[in-house]
Image (cartoon, rainbow, N blue to C red):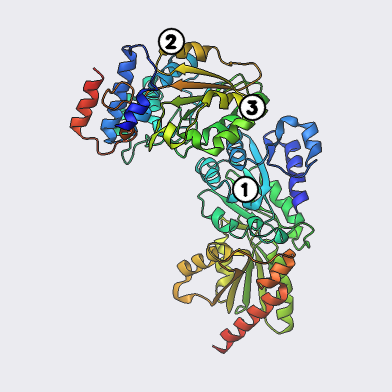
């Protein structure tokens, strides 16, 4: 997904003179071909996140579409004021490509784990927040980025992620994609973002074996939230569970529950938010290890949702 | 009073202010009167810098503020915006009467300038340390397009405490952006007191030179000296320029000069307005 994303920057730059790349201090040789072919639109500016964001803003004020790339925690936490003021206040078409969203950098510890990126990015006016499920979907997203007039946060997964997205489902920023539809109206609904959609599809399979009818809806765009899709699937649901690789405070699950509380009132379905707790991760290992620590594997999601659904049925 | 004594020792001996340098501060007071508040000292120290830029240096079209060939002037120390608003009014970007609405609920003129609201304002500033990076991006864009626009970023001395300024300076030096000029309004007093006590910037000229800028000191109230230095831009053909303007906080208002207490004032009543006008007689 990561390689696909940066390679797409080069492809888009070939298509459109406005597109350019600004990195901080990334892998040697990154986008070398682009650097050679269009040196005036390829920049590697060192570990200066505040400057990189401001510089991209300056370019965008002149009509360019800068794609800024660095590690997710640094492109969000380190230069939050620049993202807020330079990009969001000016509402500029700068794209933030965030390496290692969520728990990708598990072995590197909490300084590198972007657990609240979705929450803090979605709190900013004018910001669009995305987390696609796989490399194929990344291509579809990137193809939309030339014409989207607002800043976009593009959260990257680890790379080599299983491809679950499908061409025939189409792609539009802000439009959720139903990945699996339950047969009955009073079903369990899993709403997910990023690679958690893959885990949710796995969980849905497991639940189906236990006779639990499940819908899975993928939100590659967290903001603007596809409210219509949330309401359509939540209506009459036996249980709505949101699943994300990020803190449950202010993230995707919060966006969904805020909407449901506001729109459905007394008709609110049982809700469950699955994500990271309000704590810095204390373990290392692999991303998958941390998924297990936090109950984000397909099996754990199925178990948690299954139990909850059972309770709701009894109630 | 220690604040005044310390800063006064750094003051340059500027030539007396001419009629235009008395007229423009009166417009600043007009805005302060309208808003009953504002950054008095921070605006007054900027008046001659803004005057020379808009009277003699910058290329612009007031009726076509987004003209692509214009020079870009970013007031990175956004709190000094009254000095900019005054020039925009004087040059016809906005009506003079708009100054009376400063900071009022429906005004386009806020306590910090917003690009989306005010014709002629390049970027929304107020949070400090952002402007030089915008300038780097704009200067690189001009280079790509082979456009001879100059990019001028005006910063405060307190502002350059921000690390982001020095990140941007590294970047500008690396790219040898001779179309980019950093201007420092070095009035030597930041909000909390003298820069020498709060966060000493010296040796300031050496710092900019060490970041690969061609740097020069100038009396920031000497109109003729300012003209000369701005007309000589770029100071070097293969480097960005830095112009350190030695200024006086609250310049022209005798009782406010060098006084950190006049950095910003709120609840400016009629009697204070009268005193400000009187001081400019």
- Marks 1 and 2, how far apart at CA: 45 Å
Q: Which residue is tagged 2?
A: B224
Nearer-N-terminus badge (3/2): 3
Residue B7, x across and y down, in percent: 37, 27
Do pointers 1 and 2 mark residues of a single chain?
Answer: no
Q: Is residue A53 left or right of residue A106?
A: left
Q: Can residue B98 be seen in this view?
A: no
Residue B166's image quarter? Answer: top right
Q: How crowded is mark 3: few (under 14 residues within 10 Å), some or many (20 or more)?
A: many
Q: In this view, does A290 lie to the left or right of B258?
A: right
Do pointers 3 and 2 mark residues of a single chain?
Answer: yes
Give the quadrant of the N terminus of chain A: bottom right
Rendered image: mark on residue B173: 3
Residue A296's image quarter? Answer: bottom right
- The answer to whether residue A246 is above or below residue B269 is below
Q: How crowded is mark 2: few (under 14 residues within 10 Å), some or many (20 or more)?
A: few
Residue A100, x across and y down, in percent: 69, 55
- At 66% from the left edge and 73% from the top edge, which residue is drawn? A295
Q: Can residue B162 be seen in this view?
A: yes
Choose between B139 and A226: the one closer to the eye.
B139
Choose between A83 and B244: the one closer to the eye.
B244
Q: Which residue is tagged 1?
A: A75
Residue A55's image quarter? Answer: top right
**Circle 2 — which element?**
helix
**Circle 3 — which element?**
helix
| Chain ID, mark 2 | B
- The answer to whether residue A9 is above or below residue A72 is above
């Amino acid at each position: 997904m990561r390689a696909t994303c940066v390679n797409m920057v080069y492809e888009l730059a070939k298509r459109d003179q406005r597109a350019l790349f600004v990195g901080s201090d990334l892998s040697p040789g990154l986008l070398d071909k682009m650097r050679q072919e269009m040196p005036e639109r390829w920049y590697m500016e060192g570990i200066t996140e505040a400057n990189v964001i401001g510089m991209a803003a300056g370019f965008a004020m002149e009509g360019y579409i800068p794609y800024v790339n660095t590690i997710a925690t640094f492109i969000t936490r380190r230069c939050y004021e620049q993202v807020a003021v330079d990009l969001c206040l000016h509402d500029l078409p700068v794209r933030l490509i965030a390496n290692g969203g969520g728990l990708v950098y598990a072995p590197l510890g909490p300084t590198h784990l972007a657990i609240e990126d979705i929450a803090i990015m979605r709190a900013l006016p004018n910001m669009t927040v995305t987390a696609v499920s796989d490399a194929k979907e990344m291509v579809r997203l990137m193809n939309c980025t030339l014409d989207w007039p607002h800043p976009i946060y593009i959260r990257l997964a680890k790379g080599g992620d299983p491809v679950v997205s499908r061409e025939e489902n189409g792609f539009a920023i802000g439009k959720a994609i139903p990945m699996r539809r339950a047969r009955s109206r009073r079903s369990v609904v899993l709403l997910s973002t990023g690679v958690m959609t893959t885990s949710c599809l796995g969980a849905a399979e497991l639940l189906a074996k236990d006779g639990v009818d499940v819908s899975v809806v993928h939100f590659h765009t967290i903001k603007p939230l596809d409210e219509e899709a949330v309401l359509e699937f939540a209506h009459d649901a036996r249980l709505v569970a949101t699943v994300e690789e990020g803190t449950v405070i202010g993230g995707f699950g919060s966006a969904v529950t805020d909407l449901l509380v506001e729109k459905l009132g007394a008709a609110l379905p049982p809700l469950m938010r699955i994500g990271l707790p309000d704590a810095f991760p204390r373990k290392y290992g692999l991303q998958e290890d941390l998924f297990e620590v936090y109950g984000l594997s397909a099996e754990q999601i199925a178990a948690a949702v299954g139990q909850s659904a059972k309770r709701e049925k009894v109630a | 009073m220690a604040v005044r004594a310390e800063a006064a020792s750094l003051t340059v001996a500027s030539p007396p202010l001419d009629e235009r340098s008395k007229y423009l501060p009166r417009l600043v007071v007009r805005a302060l009167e309208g808003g009953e508040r504002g950054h008095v000292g921070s605006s007054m120290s900027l008046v001659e810098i803004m005057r020379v830029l808009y009277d003699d240096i910058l290329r612009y079209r007031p009726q076509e503020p987004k003209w692509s060939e214009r020079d870009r002037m970013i007031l990175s120390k956004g709190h000094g915006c009254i000095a900019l608003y005054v020039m925009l009014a004087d040059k016809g970007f906005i009506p003079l009467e708009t100054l009376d609405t400063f900071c009022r609920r429906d005004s386009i003129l806020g306590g910090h300038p917003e690009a989306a609201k005010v014709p002629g304002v390049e970027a929304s500033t107020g949070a400090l340390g952002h402007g030089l990076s915008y300038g780097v991006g704009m200067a690189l864009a001009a280079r790509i397009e082979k456009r001879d626009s100059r990019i001028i970023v005006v910063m405060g001395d307190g502002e350059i405490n921000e690390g982001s300024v020095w990140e941007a300076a590294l970047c500008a030096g690396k790219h040898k952006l001779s179309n980019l000029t950093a201007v420092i309004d070095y009035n030597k007093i930041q909000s909390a007191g003298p820069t020498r006590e709060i966060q000493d910037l010296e040796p300031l000229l050496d710092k900019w030179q060490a970041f690969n800028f061609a740097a020069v000191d100038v009396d920031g109230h000497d109109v003729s000296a300012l003209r000369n230095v701005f007309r000589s831009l770029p100071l070097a053909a293969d480097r960005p320029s830095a112009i350190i303007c030695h200024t006086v906080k609250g310049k022209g208002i005798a009782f406010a000069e060098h006084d950190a207490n006049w950095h910003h004032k709120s609840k400016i009543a009629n009697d204070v307005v009268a005193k400000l006008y009187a001081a400019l007689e």
